[in-house]
Image (cartoon, rainbow, N blue to C red):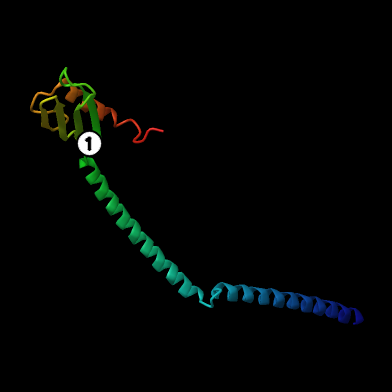
Amino acid sequence: MPWLVLILLVTTLALLVLCIRQAFQLRDLKNQWKTLFQNVDGENLERLLESHLLRSAEIESEIRDGKARLETLETKMRSSKRYVGLVRYDAFPEVGGSQSFSLAVYDEEGNGAVMTSQVGRQLARIFGKQLIGGKSDVSLTVEEQQAIEMAAMGKTRPRVNQ
């Protein structure tokens, strides 16, 4: 009988230690949950998640708007006159200093214009020729053709020389 009482006493002490240990673990777990559900400002987790979801929806809307604006800009960019070529030359033998020029300006499709200014001592002439698909329905001078070729080279070179 004394052995049975001793075994029961040891078992009871072991169970008591186990219960105390589990009580501490439960307290720690409760503190973790309390921290999880309470923000620094005292907001609960549900409100915090709702605000994050709303902000996420706002950001998605801004991204959609940005994509739409980008598509609009890309469409406009195709028709913007951004390829430019300039050739300066002496149109008349009596005038030096390369005062005459041909300027080609066109878009992604090759639509634009070539403008030529010929400067002499007594006169100045200005011509404008339309470009459609990189070609003109009027014959082009050598300088105008060079200006178009120079603009075409601009597609692969950087915008600003460094």
| Residue 122: x %, y % from top left | 10, 26
- Residue occupying the point 41% across, 33% down: 162
Picture quarter with the N terminus: bottom right
Amino acid carrying label 1: it is Glu
Mark 1 lies on residue = 108
- Residue occupying the point 32% across, 55% down: 66
Query: Residue 26 or 67: which is nearer the viewer?
Result: 67
Label count reads: 1
Locate residue 150: give its quadrant.
top left
Q: Is residue 123 left or right of residue 24?
A: left
| Residue 127: x %, y % from top left | 11, 30
Locate residue 37: give its quadrant.
bottom right
Residue that sits furthest to the top in the current view:
93
Q: Secondary structure at mark 1?
A: loop
- Residue occupying the point 74% across, 74% down: 21
- Residue occupying the point 43% across, 71% down: 50
Q: Is residue 24 left or right of residue 104?
A: right
Locate residue 59: give its quadrant.
bottom left
